[in-house]
Image (tube, rainbow, N blue to C red):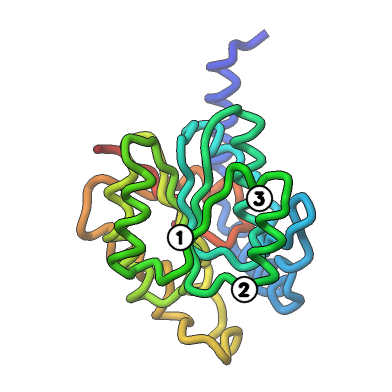
Amino acid sequence: MSSQADDMQLQAAAIARMGEDAGLNDLSRRWFRHSAEHKYSYNFSWMGRPIIQYPQDIVAMQELVWQVQPDLIVETGIAHGGSLVLYASFLKLMGEGRVLGIDIDIRAHNRAAIEAHPMADRIDMIEGSSIDEAVVARVFEAARGKRVLLVLDSNHTHEHVLRELALYTPLVKAGSYAVVFDTVVEWMPAEAFPDRPWGPGNNPMTAVEAFLKTTDRFEVDTQMDAKLQISVAPKGFLRCIAD
């Protein structure tokens, strides 16, 4: 019987082959684009709250939360609160940690539903722009002395995401992650976003690429990309490799 280390090596090799399989990668991209036409990510909820995520990314976040063991998960962008509830449920099972969500407009019905949820005792929310200095100061105060996992999922323009990365990645230390969602916008047709200020050439992926040119503290977790295949965050799982 092989050892656990041998099994992990075999798994890593299999994942690497997936990442190198041009046919599989192309099929995954085409499937994603087609599924997006049907608003596929809107079909799912977590513990009763709409989550607006692909199942693969939900599993990926579970893996990261267990791996990182954060004291605090900071997420920009709340929407219906499904992701906040997701992370809070992970942390509750683990026994420690809180979730802090930030949104420029927390609608009253969503706030009420989140605050009434069984996971509410692990969730805090701040209403305001994620790049407002006062909001950033409150987040840093909440994160003082804590191991932070960062998730960026608010305004998806290049300028906004790049500013979020500059402001919040100092909270993330070696071994943890900054996860930037919706980098996949770069690979989508422009007509997919007719009423949005973002699109190909102006989106989270272009912001990540610009950010990585300014720092040696983060690297793309290419293994995550290779094994997920279908994700809203290709090149968006950023592993912190230095404090």
Q: Nearer the viewer, mark 3 or mark 2?
A: 2
Residue 207 percent coordinates (x, y): 35, 68
Q: Nearer the viewer, mark 2 or mark 1?
A: 2
Q: Residue at 32%, 67% (x, y): give it.
A: 162
Q: Which residue is mark 3?
A: 85
Q: Which of pointers 3 and 2 lies earlier in the amino acid sequence?
A: 3
* Mark 2 residue element: loop
Q: Residue at 40%, 41% (x, y): give it.
A: 148
On residue 152, the disc is: 1
Amino acid identity at mark 1: Leu
Is residue 234 visible in the rendered image? The answer is no
Q: CA distance from mark 3 to mark 2?
A: 16 Å
Q: Quadrant of residue 202?
A: bottom left
Amino acid identity at mark 2: Arg
What quarter of the picture does the C terminus occupy? top left
* Mark 1 residue element: strand
Q: CA distance from mark 2 to mark 1?
A: 19 Å
